[in-house]
């Protein structure tokens, strides 16, 4: 699918908000309002959710980390909708966000949903992971939402914070798969963080390749140059394995 076919117009948003804000005032039921609004947004975007998601999420522990690749603000919008539909009753949500973006988003989120908590990430400041761990170590019934890439721009590296936070707080990690080609949302099996960052890094990089982001060139692990490189490595590895087999002559 071409990138322009994955692009989504903002024009629907005003209509939906107006309609459902009116509904909220008429019914005075925020729980119903926000779920209906979230379902409607995903419907307008053309997304469907895996039918097994609800059953899976009900089995999750009382705290966990949710990660996904990040190439567009729509990743945040879709994640917000999934939270409201499936996670809100059981969890508060803690979102790691850059200070520059948090200044604009925080007032809006607090107005929309009091269960949102924003953990401000200040760039180039040491000790942020320790501060986050200290804030959450005695809390329960929450999910931490973050993008390990730390940016919507293409980067060949992911930040180590997600590994250390998950390890220090003993959080299983859930990968939220958002596929913009298939217009499908699903979840990967819970992942237990390993002792080394490199292992968790490889898991995240590999899982990214299962889902097509809105802008594949902005996710390093779905870029054609990276995929070609992986195919070459896989081919060389396969050839190496074959050459190591003993040369057995057929029985005549």
Image (cartoon, grey):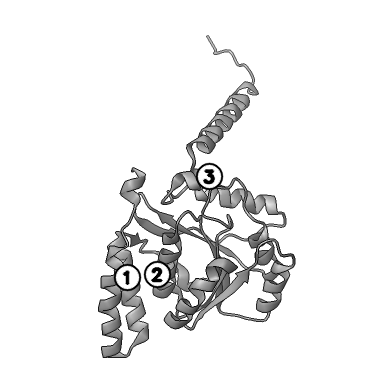
Residue closer to the observer: 248 or 176: 176
Q: Secondary structure at mark 1?
A: helix
Residue at horizontal 56 percent and vertical 79 percent from the top: 141
- Check the picture and name the quadrant holding the N terminus: top left
Q: Secondary structure at mark 3?
A: helix
| Earlier sequence position, callout 1 versus callout 3 | 1
Check contact, mark 3 vs mark 2: CB within 8 A. Answer: no
Horizontal side, residue 163 vs residue 71: left or right: right
Q: Residues within 10 Å of mark 1 (few under 14, many from 20)?
A: some
Q: Which residue is mark 3?
A: 221
Looking at the rendered structure, which numbered label has been put on residue 81?
2
Residue 187 image offset from top left, x and y in percent = 46, 60
Residue closer to the observer: 158 or 206: 158
Check contact, mark 2 vs mark 1: CB within 8 A. Answer: yes
Residue closer to the observer: 158 or 13: 13
Looking at the rendered structure, which numbered label has been put on residue 39?
1
Residue at horizontal 43 percent and vertical 69 percent from the top: 80
Residue 26 image offset from top left, x and y in percent = 26, 89
| Earlier sequence position, callout 3 versus callout 2 | 2
Q: Residues within 10 Å of mark 3 (few under 14, many from 20)?
A: many
The answer to whether residue 172 is seen in the rendering is yes
């Amino acid at each position: 699918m071409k990138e322009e076919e994955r692009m989504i117009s903002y024009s629907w948003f005003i209509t939906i908000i107006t309609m459902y804000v009116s509904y909220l005032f008429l019914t005075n039921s925020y729980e119903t309002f926000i779920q209906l609004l979230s379902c409607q947004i995903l419907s307008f975007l053309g997304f469907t959710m895996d039918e097994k998601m609800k059953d899976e999420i009900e089995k999750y522990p009382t705290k966990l980390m949710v990660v996904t690749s990040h190439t567009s603000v729509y990743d945040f919008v879709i994640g917000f909708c999934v939270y409201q539909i499936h996670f809100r009753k059981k969890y508060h949500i803690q979102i790691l966000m850059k200070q520059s973006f948090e200044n604009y988003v925080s007032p809006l989120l607090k107005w929309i949903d009091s269960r949102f908590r924003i953990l401000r990430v200040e760039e180039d400041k040491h000790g942020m992971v320790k501060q986050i761990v200290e804030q959450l170590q005695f809390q329960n019934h929450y999910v931490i939402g973050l993008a390990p890439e730390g940016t919507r721009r293409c980067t060949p590296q992911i930040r180590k914070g997600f590994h250390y936070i998950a390890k220090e707080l003993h959080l299983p990690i859930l990968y939220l798969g958002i596929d913009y080609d298939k217009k499908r949302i699903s979840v990967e099996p819970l992942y237990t963080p390993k002792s080394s960052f490199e292992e968790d890094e490889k898991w995240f990089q590999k899982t990214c390749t299962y889902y097509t982001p809105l802008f594949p060139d902005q996710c390093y692990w779905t870029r054609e140059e990276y995929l070609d490189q992986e195919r070459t490595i896989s081919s060389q590895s396969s050839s190496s394995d074959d050459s190591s087999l003993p040369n057995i002559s057929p029985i005549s």
